[in-house]
Amino acid sequence: MPQDSYDVSQRDQLAAQVLEYCKQHGVKIAAAESLTGGLLADAFVRIPGASEVFLGSAVTYDIRAKAKILGVDAALLAREGAVHPQVARQMAAATARLYNQPEYDDRVIGLSTTGVAGPGPDGDKPAGLVYIGCSLPAVVTGEERVESAVELHLHGDREQVREQTVWHVLRNVRQLTVGLQE
């Protein structure tokens, strides 16, 4: 799908595939959202049966909330700001820990979004610069927990950037889960 287009039915299909994979493998999903402000959570909860897998989303829009609620390194945030790949990785890892319960046995996928939705830049960070993070548990990777971040350069107005970010998160987690099984 091109970065400048967005199809809700395809988004729903991606979300449903990810949820089904997680259900079949006893894995849960949690998110930490900044620029998407709950849109990622909405992509999952739109799907019937999502409550079997999706645990929740911490919307940490404010930079201080990222540090206090999620435990993102405050020195990193002060030095680099919120729009940085390491921030996305830390947000994803933190949300997996935050939502984990003893009965989940560290089988929680953590997802994150951070970036500049626009309309203008945020300091030296241009509108459309986004980082999405993913923290995959060992049960998915076959080894140990792995944290990753992907840099995106998106185009469009504020809502388009936010929607495209959700699309990319879903596509990325699908590739990292369902795609590994194909």
Image: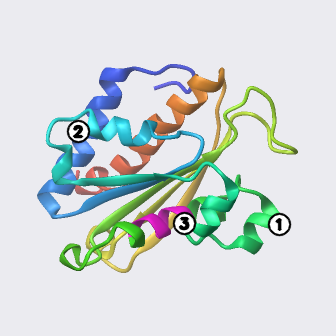
Q: Which residues are magenta?
A: 91-96
Residue that extends furthest to the right in the rendered view of this protein: 124
Q: Is residue 109 left or right of residue 139?
A: right
- The residue that label 1 is drawn on is 79
Q: Give the residue number, with chain letter if any, for mark 3.
A: 69
Dot 1 or dot 3: first in sequence order is: 3
**Residue 40 percent coordinates (x, y):** 42, 41
- Mark 2 or 1, which is nearer the eye? 1
Q: Secondary structure at mark 2?
A: helix
Q: Main secondary structure of the magenta part?
A: helix
Between disc 1 and disc 3, the foreground one is: 3
Q: Residue at x 27, y 74 (%)?
A: 101
Q: Which residue sits at x=66%, y=52%? A: 62
- The answer to which of 1 and 167 lies nearer the viewer is 167
Q: CA distance from mark 1 to mark 3?
A: 19 Å
Query: Is residue 93 located in the magenta-colored stretch of the structure?
Result: yes
Asked whether, in this view, residue 104 is left or right of residue 70, the answer is left
Q: CA distance from mark 3 to mark 2?
A: 29 Å
Q: Which mark is residue 4?
A: none
Q: Position of residue 139 (x, y in %)?
A: 26, 73
Residue type at mark 2 is Ala
- Where residue 137 sits, quadrant-wise, is bottom left
Amino acid type, label 1: Arg
